[in-house]
Image (cartoon, helix red, strand yellow):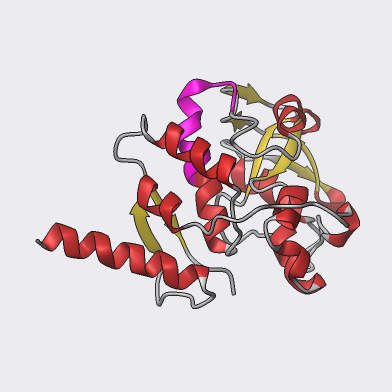
């Protein structure tokens, strides 16, 4: 009985977040419950322009762009950073393909939810300020990730019905990160995307999704 009540409460928290009311703390739900909490709607990218999402800004004015902030945060060794926040080297794990990279020029910073995909999932109705916040979201750990340029460009603007990480062991983490981002920003999924997420989740055991609604 307690377990059923807890599951119902988690689902309610997720639904509240979708309606724009942030819970008092980060919500944690099972991966299937998180997927079911997503709003399913047809998506269209009409009118999309990448410039609608201003990104790689220096929000805190410390001299480091969003890209640099992610590289510094995700390096597994102390990164070498020169003047003007120019990152020379470090050690990064590209979890999409399992590669370890020491040259930052080989890395892209991936928007977990691609900008074009976000546009069609609801961001087209946002203010330019909210789109900028989405494109530079350093608050949520998995909104932006450093991965090899090859995998990022292979993904492009595809959703999980069209693309999954080449490393099979990364796929459960990936869809949990994807769903977390969609819930955080109250973005919808289309039916094919929803069904693909559930198919992958079926093999993900007790994978959970933690998220907090964006301000």
- Image vertical order of residue 195 relative to residue 115, above or below: above
Position of residue 78 measured from the top left corner of the image (x, y, whole percent): 62, 40
Total labels drawn: 0
Q: Residue at x 29, y 40 (%)?
A: 206
Can you say which quadrant of the picture contains the N terminus?
bottom left
Q: Main secondary structure of the magenta part?
A: helix
Q: Quadrant of the C terminus?
A: bottom right
Q: Position of residue 160 (x, y in %)?
A: 59, 36
Magenta-tinted stretch? 165-176
> Which of the pair 71/11 is nearer the observer?
11
Judge by depth and name the residue closer to the eye, 151 or 59.
151
* Residue 60 visible, this orientation: no
Task: Give yes or no for residue 47 being in the magenta stretch.
Answer: no
Q: Return the residue nearer the eye: 175 or 107.
A: 175
Picture quadrant where residue 146 is located: top right
Q: Position of residue 89 (x, y in %)?
A: 73, 33
Q: Quadrant of residue 9?
A: bottom left
Q: Residue at x 77, y 31 (%)?
A: 153
Write the residue at 37% across / 46% down. Answer: 32
Q: Determine whether, in the image, residue 152 is placed left or right of residue 201.
A: right
Tell me: 82 left or right of 73: right
Q: Residue furthest left?
A: 1
Which residue appears at 60% of the width and 34% of the height? 161
Coordinates of residue 135 in the picture (x, y in percent): 74, 57
Answer left or right for 80 relative to 199: right
Above or below 106: residue 24 = below
Say whether residue 174 is visible.
yes
**Residue 169 colored magenta?**
yes
């Amino acid at each position: 009985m307690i377990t059923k009540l807890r599951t119902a409460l988690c689902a309610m928290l997720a639904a509240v977040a979708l309606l724009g009311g942030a819970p008092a703390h980060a919500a944690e739900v099972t991966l299937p419950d998180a997927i079911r909490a997503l709003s399913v709607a047809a998506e269209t990218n009409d009118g999309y322009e990448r410039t609608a999402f201003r990104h790689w800004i220096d929000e805190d004015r410390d001299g480091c762009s969003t890209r640099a902030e992610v590289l510094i945060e995700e390096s597994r060794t102390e990164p070498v950073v020169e003047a003007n926040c120019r990152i020379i080297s470090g050690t990064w794990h590209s979890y999409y393909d399992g590669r370890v990279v020491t040259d930052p020029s080989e890395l892209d910073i991936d928007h977990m939810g691609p900008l074009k995909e976000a546009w069609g999932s609801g961001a087209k109705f946002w203010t330019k300020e909210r789109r900028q916040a989405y494109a530079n979201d350093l608050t949520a750990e998995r909104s932006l990730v450093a991965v090899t340029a090859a995998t990022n460009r292979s993904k492009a603007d595809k959703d999980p019905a069209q693309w999954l990480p080449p490393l099979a062991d990364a796929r459960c983490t990936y869809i949990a990160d994807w769903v977390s981002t969609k819930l955080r920003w109250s973005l919808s999924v289309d039916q094919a995307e929803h069904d693909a997420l559930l198919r992958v989740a079926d093999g993900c055991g007790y994978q959970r999704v933690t998220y907090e609604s964006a301000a």
